[in-house]
Amino acid sequence: MSSFLTDEASLSPSLRLELKLPDLVIVHKNDSMAADLANKIEAKYQGSYRFFQEISDFNGVRPKPPEDFQPQMVISLGGDGTLLYSSRAWGLDGTPILGVNLGNLGFLAVVEPIWLNELLETALAGQAEMEVRQALDISVIRDNARQAFFTIINDAVINKGALSRIMNLRLSMAGAAFWDFRADGLILATPTGSTAYNLSAGGPVVHPSLPVVIVTPICPFTLSSRSLILPLDLELVVSIDQNATDTHLTGDGQVYLPLRAGDLVKVSRSQATLRLIANPHRQYFDALRVKLGFFNNDRG
């Protein structure tokens, strides 16, 4: 990651006057603590950077930045949901994201407030380490035409609506092998999302560095229907049963789309890259231990 700061000593006076300030985005959840922290960050660096603030869970019309706005970094203030929103809105082109955890779990937002000043200074100095996370592209095909397309960081979930009824689904892999099963739904997760809904549904925890997709049925009808861990480059297609009703697709818990009988949901490796600024004070296995209680061996 290159430094955002320019060596102005090497510039002529006229060129310094024309230099546009680097752009920084702050995305925060809609509460007073997050908003206050966003304003403090902007006040501290005002004059060195140009800021654009956005609320992640704002229900109105999304504000637009200036036309020439090109963010150098995104600062996400909230929980994992805020960071997922920040990723879709700003980060899928590779713009680095600093995720500050103001929520509870904090698997993606790995920077606790006590480390914010240190890691923000490190990032602005161009010395931060990055974690690259894979993403998945989701397409919905209806009557041979693409009806919807979006990119996910955590998971895509196919399930029923208010009435809990079992579904008949077919998962095709690379146009060859297929798997027919009955379940309450299906989770298609990235390794990053393996600790979210996938884990709650009995799926495995997968290290985020592995290039795979996790497929986990939700409450399957038979005990033999268990999670699959498949290569990332293997295109997957989920066929919605011709008799299906009240079925929907959810992406990262934030994108919602009703599905119809006969729809195809295609899942493939995304060319988008998500770059998260790493926290040297907390490793992935620390998060499993502290947040989920893994590795806390009972020695009696």
Image (cartoon, rainbow, N blue to C red):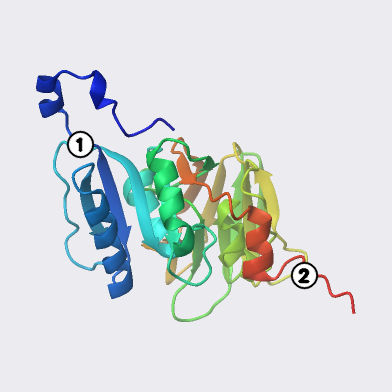
Front one among 200 and 281: 281
Q: Furthest-front residue in view?
A: 9
Q: Position of residue 299 (x, y in %)?
A: 89, 74
In x, y percent, where is residue 132? 53, 41
Secondary structure beneath dot 1 equals loop
Q: Nearer the viewer, residue 92 or 235?
A: 92
**What is the secondary structure assignment of the residue under circle 2?**
loop
Q: Locate residue 212 relative to residue 122 in the image: left or right.
A: right
Q: Please state which of the two labelled residues, at mark 1 or mark 2, is closer to the viewer.
A: 1
Tell me the quarter of the image containing the C terminus.
Answer: bottom right
Residue wearing tag 1: 21
Q: In this orientation, which residue lies closer to the viewer: 106 or 16?
A: 16
The residue at the far right in this view is: 300
Spot occupied by residue 249 in the image (x, y as percentages of width and height): 44, 62
Residue visible at 48% across and 67% down? 244
**Quarter residue 167 falls in:** bottom right
Quadrant where the N terminus is found in the figure: top left
Q: Please give the label number shown on residue 282.
A: none
Instruction: Say which residue label 2 marks.
Output: 296
Q: Is residue 213 visible?
A: yes
Type of the residue with mark 1: Leu
Vertical side of 241 occupied by 236: above or below? above
Q: Amino acid at mark 2?
A: Asn
Query: Residue 241: x and y, percent?
Result: 52, 61
Residue count near mark 1 (Cα–Cα under 10 Å), binned few <14, some 14–19, many ≥20: some
| Residue plotted at (72% across, 63% down) | 225
Q: Residues within 10 Å of mark 2 (few under 14, many from 20)?
A: few
